Image: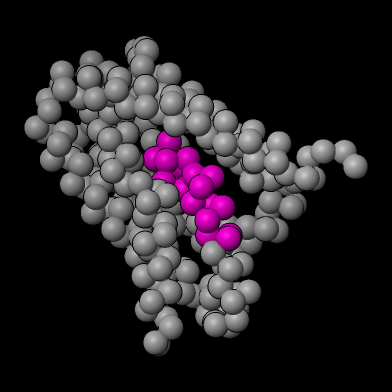
């Protein structure tokens, strides 16, 4: 127990800056401005559940999954960056969509942004996926915890992180009511621009990692 709680705290403290719930809250406001409170809260809950499941899956079988499909961390970064940039362009130049205020309730309910872009790549993007794989490897190599305990500690940390993020995203609904329709439209375009920048930076980081990867160059 003396090692358990500090490692859980270390996991949460390491994951939160990478996931950046403040950025996720801004994105949430931008793309759910016309959803009802109940619809938005459902999207938030599902996104946190998806995020937890994704990170736990990559924690337990990340190396196996990536080796099975031949996916590298740089490739994961580049793909995630392309998705984020694509969604950002959609927010910058909106077209008629289910998010339009004139859309009926049934059409809005069919819109599900909990998995993409909220859970992936928003909350469980390339950075957080790579981080949980790296953390499990680092703890096991340190020898301070057994392998089962390592997975248990980081799994608990992921769940605690998801709970913290859930509260942060629920609080974002207050901003939504304060900003109003015009404010939401402005925030949506600002966040769209930032998402394009973040996506491009993900791609740049992925390309840089790829260039510096010895396995990329022929021997």
Could one spot residue 183 in this view of the protein? yes
Quarter holding residue 137: bottom right
Percent x, y of residue 159: 39, 64
Up the image or down, 139 lies above or below 58; here it is below
In the image, farthest residue toward the left: 178
- Which residue shows up at 57% across the image and 31% down it? 204
Up the image or down, 164 lies above or below 149; here it is above
- Looking at the magenta stretch, what is its main secondary structure? helix
Q: Is residue 190 left or right of residue 152?
A: left
In the image, farthest residue toward the bottom: 1
What colour-coding does the image apply? one colour
Up the image or down, 136 lies above or below 130; here it is below
Percent x, y of residue 90: 41, 19
Could one spot residue 28 in this view of the protein? no
- Which residue shows up at 42% across the image and 57% down it? 15
Q: Is residue 181 left or right of residue 67?
A: left
Magenta includes 121? yes
Magenta includes 129? yes
Percent x, y of residue 162: 35, 57
Percent x, y of residue 56: 51, 61
The residues colored magenta run 117-134
Location of the N terminus by quadrant is bottom left
Q: Is residue 100 left or right of residue 49?
A: left
Location of the C terminus by quadrant is top right
Quarter holding residue 183: top left
- Which residue shows up at 42% across the image and 49% down it? 18
In the image, farthest residue toward the front: 212
- Which residue shows up at 40% across the image and 72% down it? 8
The residue nearer to you, when weighing 53 against 153, is 153
Q: Is residue 135 left or right of residue 72?
A: left
């Amino acid at each position: 127990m003396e090692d358990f709680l500090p490692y859980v705290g270390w996991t949460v403290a390491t994951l939160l800056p990478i996931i950046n719930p403040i950025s996720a809250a801004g994105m949430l406001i931008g793309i759910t401005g016309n959803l009802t409170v109940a619809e938005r809260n459902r999207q938030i809950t599902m996104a946190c559940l998806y995020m937890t499941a994704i990170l736990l899956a990559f924690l337990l079988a990340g190396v196996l999954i990536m080796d099975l499909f031949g996916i590298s961390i740089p490739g994961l970064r580049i793909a995630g960056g392309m998705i984020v940039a694509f969604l950002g362009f959609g927010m910058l130049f909106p077209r008629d969509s289910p998010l339009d205020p004139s859309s009926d309730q049934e059409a809005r309910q069919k819109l599900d942004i909990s998995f993409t872009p909220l859970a992936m790549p928003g909350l469980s993007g390339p950075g957080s996926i790579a981080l949980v794989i790296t953390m499990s490897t680092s703890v096991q190599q340190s020898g301070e915890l057994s392998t089962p305990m390592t997975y248990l500690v980081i799994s608990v940390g992921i769940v605690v992180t998801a709970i913290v993020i859930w509260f942060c995203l629920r609080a974002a609904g207050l901003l939504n009511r304060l900003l109003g329709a015009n404010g939401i439209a402005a925030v949506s375009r600002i966040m769209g621009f930032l998402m394009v920048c973040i996506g491009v930076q993900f791609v740049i980081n992925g390309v840089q990692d790829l260039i510096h990867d010895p396995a990329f160059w022929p021997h």
